[in-house]
Image (tube, helix red, strand yellow):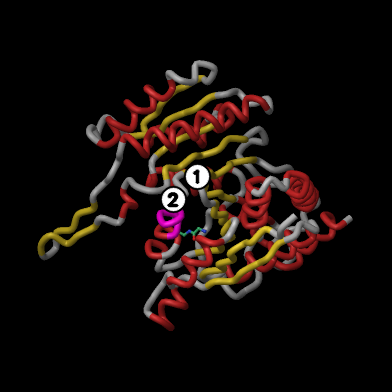
Amino acid sequence: MMAHKICVIEGDGIGKEVVPASINVLEATGVDFEFIYAEAGDEVFEKTGKALPEETVEKALESDAVFFGAAGETAADVIVKLRQILKTYANVRPVKAYKGINCLRDDIDYVIVRENTEGLYKGLEAEIDEGITTATRVITRKACERIFKFAFELARDRKKQGKEGKVTCAHKANVLKVTDGLFKKVFYEVAEEYDDIKVEDYYIDAMNMYIITKPQVFDVVVTSNLFGDILSDGAAGTVGGLGLAPSANIGDEHGLFEPVHGSAPDIAGKGIANPTATILSGVLMLRYLKEFEAADKIEKALEEVLAAGLTTPDLGGKLNTFQMAEEVAKRVEK
Ligand code: GGG
């Protein structure tokens, strides 16, 4: 077996802490990795004037997967750009309650699927006149069909594992009549190909309430780019916070794995960032690489560590980032 070639981009702030800590956990599995390090973000922008150097893009394109930390002020030119370059059109953000964590309910287990290539994050902003700015929201039939098919296939896979088999579409079609009008229309068209999967749709503002008032009813939630970015941070708050929220960016040719959180400049350098979101992103990466046994081992070890309260201070524990990751690694090695 060839080693899995992983492009590692720590990025900014706490990315420089949670990524190396999580790599220690990945290495504890014994899976053969070749880690190739690359730079991106605010720091490299200050040094070179480029937030996403060409060399980094080349390394990302040549790798089997990208393991990313956090973006800061240059997020639009780094992580949003990289997802577009790699054509990772589905941003998969699991929302799951783990034992030992103070969650809204202990039966929360759903996945937000965020369209990752267009919407308001297409980057089409302009100052059309002094004090008048615009942003163009791009919603195309092609990207809608692709993301809805992805969401329905995911719901089918989850149904096989005992989940309900339901896709909820979140949009604002009553106000954004043209763009979200198309989004909602294509959702129901694609749904016709999946008569084994239940469907429903909500306005994004109502959805924002429902992830708090009835999070246990959701299975797969699909939405557009900006709505998904906002919704998933709120959802993370219902299961212990951003320190526990992983994500996978999936395309037909590439996969990029990163915690949902950003660079957290308020705690960067203090060694107290929670590595869980990045460790779980590593679990998603292992499943993408078909290393299922190693993925299950890490998730089980992490569950034990969380349940035992061997955590960073955000979860009430006394450990630092590397100590918490080490507790997971020790249990993986056993
Ligand atoms: N690891 C994710 C990250 O760096 N997030 C910072 C951010 O601003 N991201 C924008 C986005 O997820 O679209």
**Residue that mark 2 sits on:** 87
In percent of the image, x 41 and y 38: which residue is there? Answer: 223
Magenta-colored span: 82-86
Label 1 neighbour load within 10 Å: few <14, some 14-19, many 20+: few
In percent of the image, x 54 and y 17: which residue is there? Answer: 196
Spatial separation of the CA atoms under disc 1 and disc 2:
8 Å
**Residue that mark 1 sits on:** 252
Residue 45 x %, y %:
41, 77
- Amino acid type at image mark 2: Lys
Q: Earlier in the sequence, mark 1 or mark 2?
A: 2
Which residue lies most toward the right here?
Answer: 334
Label 2 neighbour load within 10 Å: few <14, some 14-19, many 20+: some
Task: Say whether residue 147 is visible.
Answer: yes
Which residue lies most toward the bottom here?
Answer: 47
51 horizontally vs 320: left or right: left
* Quadrant where the N terminus is found in the figure: bottom right
SS under mark 1: loop
Question: Chief secondary structure of the magenta span?
Answer: helix
171 horizontally vs 199: left or right: left
Report how many numbered discs are placed on residues in the image.
Answer: 2
Vertical position of residue 69 compared to residue 222: above or below:
below
Vertical position of residue 39 compared to residue 146: above or below:
below
- Residue 38 image-quadrant placement: bottom right
Q: Is residue 133 magenta?
A: no
In percent of the image, x 52 and y 63: which residue is there? Answer: 60
Does the residue at mark 1 contact the one at mark 2 (Cβ under 8 Å)? yes
Residue 127 x %, y %:
17, 62
